[in-house]
Amino acid sequence: MDEEHFRKIVDALVELKDTSELMLDLAYSSIILNSPELAKEVQELEEHMDELHTRFELLVLSSGFTPEESKDFLGLIRLGVVTEEIADAAAKLGEVVLRRLKPHPILKLAVEEAEETVTSAMVSERSVLNGKTIKEARIADETGMWILAIKRGKRWIRPKPTTRIEAGDVLIASGYAEGEEDFRKLASGEGPS
């Protein structure tokens, strides 16, 4: 297998992993926020995940491995299957919100008693976050909230420290409830209280 093909397999596996993790974050957020919009995004990402998984398996199967190497490649395919199963589970969580099902009393109680919350806020032009990377913005230091995902237009981004925040981005964040107001003010440009 040449290095370019190997790199494509690695990139495809990373995208599968990142997308399944993002879906779980959004599905959990859709339940906490009772947000059909987030739940719909999870469903759309699940369709995208199916395409990613098929592309990944085709890349692995077209690697030209020897019979001796087949065990190692089977492990790669199984990793892809696991990420697909995680995505399917996230989609099922989103269905709870979309079908307007009442969450189980234990789930409802767990959400109410959790010290953490999930919230969203849109970044304004005047926000100090506008134009900064996640690392430069130091949102967790300022508010106690961690950025789970960024919605930019129709795209969802699983942020890295180098991801630049732009005006119009919707930030989905998780953290302690006491930091929620400061987080919203920071994103809106009002600054923390």
Image: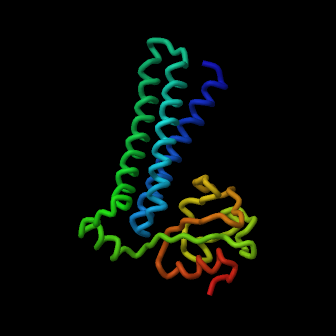
Q: Nearer the viewer, residue 144 or 169?
A: 169
Picture residue at 40% right of the left edge, 51% below the top: 90
Q: Is residue 122 left or right of residue 23?
A: right
Q: Nearer the viewer, residue 105 or 73?
A: 105
Taking the view exactly as shown, the residue that stands out farthest to the bottom is 193
Q: Is residue 107 left or right of residue 138?
A: left
Q: How was this image coloured?
A: rainbow
Taking the view exactly as shown, the residue that stands out farthest to the front is 99
Can you give x and y, in whole percent of width and height, for residue 75 in the image?
A: 42, 29
Please count the marks in the image: 0
Picture residue at 65% right of the left edge, 74% below the top: 187
Taking the view exactly as shown, the residue that stands out farthest to the left is 105
Image height check: is 68 above or below 55? above
Which quadrant does the N terminus fall into? top right
Q: Quadrant of residue 98?
A: bottom left
Image height check: is 166 above or below 186? above
Image height check: is 106 above or below 160? below
Can you give x and y, in whole percent of width and height, for residue 100 in the image?
A: 33, 63
Can you give x and y, in whole percent of width and height, for residue 17 in the image?
A: 50, 44
Q: Quadrant of residue 147?
A: bottom right
Q: Quadrant of residue 124?
A: bottom right
Picture residue at 59% right of the left edge, 66% below the top: 171
Can you give x and y, in whole percent of width and height, for residue 172 in the image?
A: 54, 65
Picture residue at 60% right of the left edge, 36% below the top: 11
Taking the view exactly as shown, the residue that stands out farthest to the top is 67
Which quadrant does the C terminus fall into? bottom right
